[in-house]
Image (tube, rainbow, N blue to C red):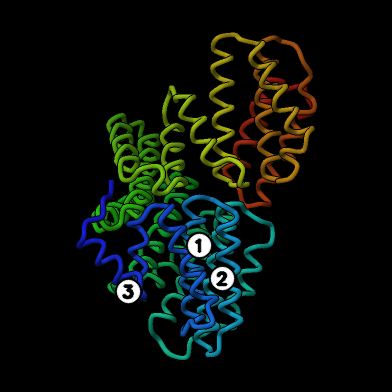
Amino acid sequence: MFEFGRDLRRLFAQARDGGDRSWIELIGADLLEAEARGQATDAHRTSCREPVLTGLKAAALWREHARRTGRRASLARALSAATDAAGAAVTPDQHTEAAMETALCLMLQYEQRGGTDLLDQIDLVLDGHDPKRPGALAARLGVAHARLEALKARRNGEAAAMLDASALMDSALHDVANRPDLAPEAAEVQLDRASLALEAGLLRGDTRLLDQAGRDLRALVAAASPEYRPVTRARALTLCAAGLSALAALADDEAARAKAHELFDAAADTFTPDHSPLDWAAIELARAARDMNPDLNRLIEIEAVTAGEGLILGALARERRVTVETQQAEQSRDASRLGRMETRLRRRLTTGQASDNPLDWAVDQITLAQVQLTRMRMTGRGDAGHLGLVLVEAAETARELGAGLIADRANQLLAAVRQTFPSSPA
């Protein structure tokens, strides 16, 4: 938890006027929004001496606010500020800076909401930008390219592609390591690289990759002080916990499971929910996914934090909440509760609440199929013939948008339909 003393306030004021962005981790989402508004206002003043630099600072602050809160409006403001900076740019380096900021905003949009052509669009934004001399700008551009390749590898979904992208991140990390002015970029690369290793390790069932990712993350946790880098520390702890959970599952190691729970708890205790709402929601959702008896009220709270913005995390939260509610109804043999859930989900689909967003539509189809399958399993009545087609379409939609976890959930349900009703055309 954070309280600014006089010394910290003075350091904050000095850092705010410089190029180092690490101070951003120290402030909560509300103060971050106020800082972004202030920079954006300054950038549009006729008296502003450095409209490009000020506009890029505003874009970076709005982007971080969008990353922490999931607000579409903040991301739109970040993109607008980056576009304005590009329009005011004069030198090649300024044009490169503006292109990088635009690319980072679009990467965040893809990470948060997916998209069918966003990665190609980012390629076009970065194309042709090559600083004439080595230095911080060249190193940051290398990071941007490496992060883009990581997103492409995740869309590809193959372990080999993830390891290739991880090698590119090694090169980018070499260029930004041991540079205090690029500490945030270095942390992002380390987190992305470890995340890729975890995903590749899980795909291959490779404990060596999982163990390596764990060592890298523990080093990042040790370097990220909770007093000065709380957000980085929480993300690293969460990935540590996820990796250890995976190792525990592969080895059936109860002690490792207990340690993973401790790490999740440590991540959750790093900051308050209002400091970074989406990080809090992601941590709590990860904890709930590994809890044999998750708290439904906590899942409802997570869903509320992530709802209404078309987020992949919000879709996952809603799917998890419906899963737990469905399991509770099945355990209590409460067919009427399942019926009420089915009615609510059908109403969402028919009133257009989900049709405005393809990802919301996919999740609502998945959760509706889950409720219907559970009801049919409980009552022995119903026709499962349509569920297979619905789930295949939902999985394809989620996969096209880059929401692999949601696509995987649809495929898991499809397998359950085929197992429960082998004669159905699913």
Give the spatial CA distance, label 3 vs label 2: 22 Å
Q: Image height check: is 182 above or below 261?
A: below
Crowd tier of the residue under label 1, counting other residues whose Cα lies within 10 Å: few below 14, some 14–19, many 20 or above: many
Relative placement, left or right, of 371 versus 355 is left
Crowd tier of the residue under label 3, counting other residues whose Cα lies within 10 Å: few below 14, some 14–19, many 20 or above: some
Give the spatial CA distance, label 2 vs label 1: 9 Å
Which quarter of the figure has residue 294? top left
Which quarter of the figure has residue 389? top right
- Lower position in the chain sequence, tag 3 or tag 2: 2
Query: Which residue does the numbered mark 2 point to in the structure image?
Result: 81
Question: Residue 112: image x %, image y %?
Answer: 56, 52
Dividing the image into 4 quarters, which one contains the C terminus?
top right
Q: Residue furthest left?
A: 7
The amino acid sitting under disc 2 is Ala
Q: Nearer the viewer, mark 3 or mark 2?
A: 2
- Taking the spot 43% from the left edge, 75% from the top edge, the residue there is 140
Q: Element under label 2?
A: helix
Query: Which residue does the numbered mark 3 point to in the structure image?
Result: 181
- Taking the spot 47% from the left edge, 50% from the top edge, the residue there is 199
Query: Which residue does the numbered mark 1 point to in the structure image?
Result: 62
Question: Residue 157: image x %, image y %?
Answer: 57, 52
Crowd tier of the residue under label 2, counting other residues whose Cα lies within 10 Å: few below 14, some 14–19, many 20 or above: many
- Taking the spot 59% from the left edge, 76% from the top edge, the residue there is 84
Residue 164 visible in the current orientation: no
Give the spatial CA distance, label 1 vs label 3: 20 Å
Residue 137 visible in the current orientation: yes
- Taking the spot 71% from the left edge, 33% from the top edge, the residue there is 365
Q: Image height check: is 194 above or below 321?
A: below
Question: Residue 54: image x %, image y %?
Answer: 47, 76
Q: Image height check: is 220 above or below 171?
A: above
